[in-house]
Amino acid sequence: MLIDTHAHLNGEEFDRDREAVIGRAASAGVAAIIDIGSDLDSCRKSLELARRPGLYATVGIHPHSAKSMSAWLKDIELMAASPEVVAIGEIGLDYYRNLSEPSAQRECFVHFLELARRSGLPVIIHDRDAHQDTVDLLRLEHVEDSGGVMHCFSGDTEMARKCLDMGLYISIAGPVTFKNNARGQQVARFVPDDRLLLETDCPFLTPEPHRGKRNEPAMVQVVAERVAALRGVPLGKIVEVTGANAQRLFGLNKGRRLVAANLEE
């Protein structure tokens, strides 16, 4: 089954037509959507969305908002115990924009890695222009104890190998469709079947040939088609293995139905 493992349906970009977006995902065969929390408000909205079948929530603080951790931490830790929550994230490091000081980002990252271990939940990791520090902290904090995924992976195959060695999954998003993204396409060929995930990161990172438009979960099919072509396998195989991986990592088959039609309920 086709699963979008990273979407931001809680964002204001979807306020006008969220129901239609969810309906289009169902029509495209998307069986489940994992909606990502990145600050206090989005975590709350993610939990609300996850009340419907086929949608799941995560809670965490994006590195851009790491400076606000002390004000939000208690509430987010309480939310992590909710049955709708399937992961801690998105968390990590972003040295591209540095909207929070790197030291604050690292402190926040470590705290949520520890929370994941205590909660028994996997982590969803954001890494932008912070490859070495990300890998070093993941090793230091024994990420293999909780497991998780490198969301919208932007490193090379050597970094992917290091992440795989720590038991992590690698998620492929819209940039794999960009003509000038040879490194990302090489990674999409490199990751073994049992560690591969798909995502949109919508409303961002819209795949070709839809660039310039808002991304949405239905477009995870475009990502799947490109990954299948790069790996030289039928689309059905990519849908099957990535769906099984998502169910396994996030425990999606534990007492909740996974049927595309449920997204329309």
Image (cartoon, rainbow, N blue to C red):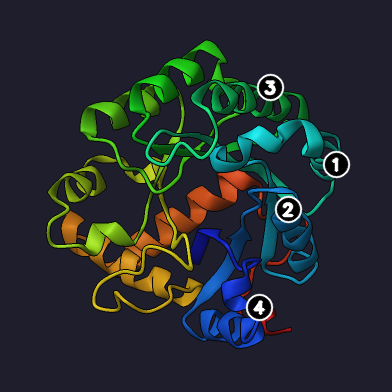
Whether label 2 touches label 1, CB < 8 Å: yes
Q: Is residue 130 above or below residue 140?
A: below
Give the labeled residue for mark 1: 75
Identify the residue at horizontal 43%, vertical 25% (top origin).
134
Under mark 1, the amino acid is: Asp
Under mark 2, the amino acid is: Cys
Identify the residue at horizontal 39%, vertical 49% (top origin).
152
Give the labeled residue for mark 3: 114
Q: Earlier in the sequence, mark 2 or mark 3?
A: 2
Q: Is residue 174 above or below residue 105?
A: below
Residues packed near mark 3 inside 10 Å, few (<14), some (14 to 19) or many (20 plus): some
- x, y percent for residue 261: 63, 82
Q: Earlier in the sequence, mark 4 or mark 3?
A: 3
Identify the residue at horizontal 56%, vertical 28% (top origin).
105
SS class, disc 4: helix
Q: Quadrant of residue 154?
A: top left
Q: Earlier in the sequence, mark 2 or mark 1?
A: 2
Q: Earlier in the sequence, mark 2 or mark 4?
A: 2
Residues packed near mark 2 inside 10 Å, few (<14), some (14 to 19) or many (20 plus): many
Give the labeled residue for mark 2: 43
Q: Is residue 232 visible?
A: no
- x, y percent for residue 22: 60, 80
